[in-house]
Amino acid sequence: AKESTELMDELNYAKNLLNASLTEKLRDVETLSKNKQRIPLLLFALERIAKSANTSSIIAKGTVNSRWSKILEVVEYSQNAYNNNVNSRLILTNLMLKLS
């Protein structure tokens, strides 16, 4: 139950993050980089949102939405960087810039 709540919280945070201004996104980098165990869950949440949005676009319009494809690409890049022990602040800064 705890994991489910954490995932729901992270999905809600990710949705808000996608709608936030660049300034707000960059402000969050500091907090997120200090909470390293949260980063994989955030990336997973962003991935789920982007995949879901892409699937909805394909069903509704018959084509992939380029915005969600770009988000998915940067999330996958960030996941790979995280798994290769790249500096978390660098990963998050790049992610926030690309999400804008």
Image (cartoon, rainbow, N blue to C red):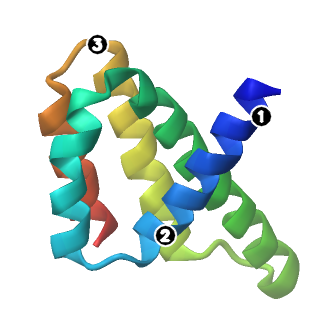
Measure the C-alpha gap from mark 3 to mark 1: 26 Å
Q: Which amino acid does label 2 sit on?
A: Asn
x and y, in percent, of residue 59 in the image: 87, 75
Secondary structure category for the residue under label 2: helix
Nearer to the camera, 78 or 23: 23
Q: In this view, does 100 lie above or below 12?
A: below
- First-in-chain label (3 vs 2): 2
Residue drawn at (31%, 28%) of the image: 35
Residue 21 left/right relative to 68: left
Among numbered discs 1 and 2, the one appearing first in the sequence = 1
Where's the C terminus, which quadrant?
bottom left
The image shows residue 8 at horizontal and vertical percentages of: 70, 47
Other-residue count near label 1 (Cα within 10 Å), few / some / many at <14 / 14–19 / ≥20: few
- State the residue at coordinates (54%, 51%): 46
Q: Nearer the viewer, residue 46 or 26?
A: 26
Q: What element carries label 3?
A: loop
Taking the view exactly as shown, the residue that stands out farthest to the top is 84
Q: In which quarter of the image is the N terminus?
A: top right
Q: Which of marks 3 and 1 is in front?
A: 1
Going from the N terminus, do you reach mark 3 or mark 1 first? 1
In the figure, 88 relative to 97: above or below? above
Q: Which residue is drawn at 64% across and 58% down?
A: 49
Q: Residue 84 carries which label?
A: 3
Direction right: furthest residue: 59
The amino acid marked with disc number 3 is: Asn
Per the rendering, the mark at residue 16 is 2
